[in-house]
Amino acid sequence: MRRMMLRWGAAVVMAALALGVWVVDPTVTRADSNGENVCHGDAGDGKGPAGLALPLKPSSFRDRAGVAEMRDNYWFWRISEGGQVEPFKSKGSAMPPWKGTLSVEDRWSVMAYQHTFTGHQGPHVPWEHPESVAMGHDIYRMSCVGCHGAQGKGDGSVGATLSPRRAPQPRDLTSSLFKFRSTPSGQLPTTSDLVRTISEGIRSSGGPLTIGLSGYRIMPSFRHMPEEQRLELVEYVKSLNKAFWERAEIRTVEIPPRPRVTPERVARGKQLYADAECRACHGDRGRGDGKSAPELKDDLQLPIQATDLTRPRRFKNGRRPEDVYRTLMTGFAGTPMPSYADALEPEQAWDLVFYVLSLSQGGTP
């Protein structure tokens, strides 16, 4: 069993699918350099050496009609639960459940890899799996239209009341400007970025309607929504913008391992805070009251408030050190918050992260 887990996990890594994005060409390229698949076989035909001895033979992933017949949610459920559920358990299935071993992203990546054996481009490709987009559209109409509008242009009837005549306003999902990304400045977010935003929501002070959204969320968290539905919602969101499917390359900003925080690092971060002119917007003590703060505007020329760094619970992109690092290196597109990827070395970025988090009692470097 351990060997099978390692083999399948290796398949995900070898196929370059653990990038947090799916079904762009680089992520579904098979690589067969690390041995056989003991159950489903190197060729995906269900004839691996261990599979031939099992009472219930492994499925063939080369059955194009059979693979296409089942919706993506079925394959996700099958990989997650394995053969430990009916009708497979009573038939003697030896397939282990992968929900405790592979992340949600990796399970969908396995699906993308599996689909390549039949010539499909994989799940989450609108022109091959329109049912996922159709389901996502239904979820969008129930959960998102009020703020983002029927066409995804950010013009829903409720959205403007969340932060009246100020930023942030609901995102125009048809544009190329997305704030919360792991990709370099100016690029579209990955699928994982969109899933993270939908799952976590967005914390920000706003109008009266945001007070009950647990920590003043300008966008609620949808963690209550099953993972499969969140992924289908993301695919519908991406279908609103053809640029998601036309991009040929996806790069992400690497977050190196977090170093140990020391007083010296915090002191260097304080100097960087001054040198990078952070205090012009965020103020000397990080309270969002810098000299430039009253004049700040977003790309729509709406007034926008500099983040109060002493209140990390309201950090829009997350308050973990890694979240703050990502924010510094990617910036917030469409706002005065720039990317410092070209200005700071990774060690300097960590110093600044630790200083920013030291400004609050809730910060935990």
Image (cartoon, rainbow, N blue to C red):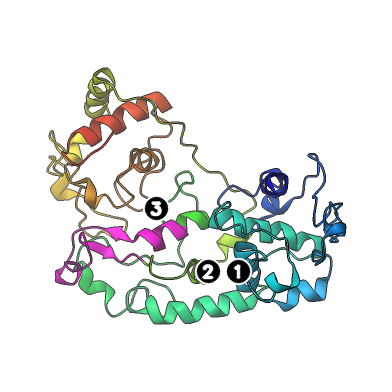
Assess whether mark 3 and mark 1 are in contact (beta carbons under 8 angstroms): no
- Res 361 visible: yes
Q: Position of residue 278 (x, y in %)?
A: 23, 35
Q: Magenta residues?
A: 194-221
Horizontal side of residue 208 vs 156, given as left or right: left
Amino acid tagged 1:
Trp
Question: Can you identify the residue that label 1 sits on?
Answer: 77
Residue ranking furthest to the top: 264
Q: Secondary structure at mark 2?
A: helix
Question: Can you identify the residue that label 3 sits on?
Answer: 180
Q: Secondary structure at mark 1?
A: helix
> What residue appears at the point 79 percent right and 50 percent down from the top-left corner?
37
* Looking at the image, residue 365 lies above or below residue 65: above
Assess whether mark 2 and mark 1 are in contact (beta carbons under 8 angstroms): yes
For residue 330, the mark is: none
Amino acid tagged 2:
Glu
Question: Can you identify the residue that label 2 sits on?
Answer: 228
Q: Is residue 305 magenta?
A: no
148 vs 256, nearest the viewer: 256
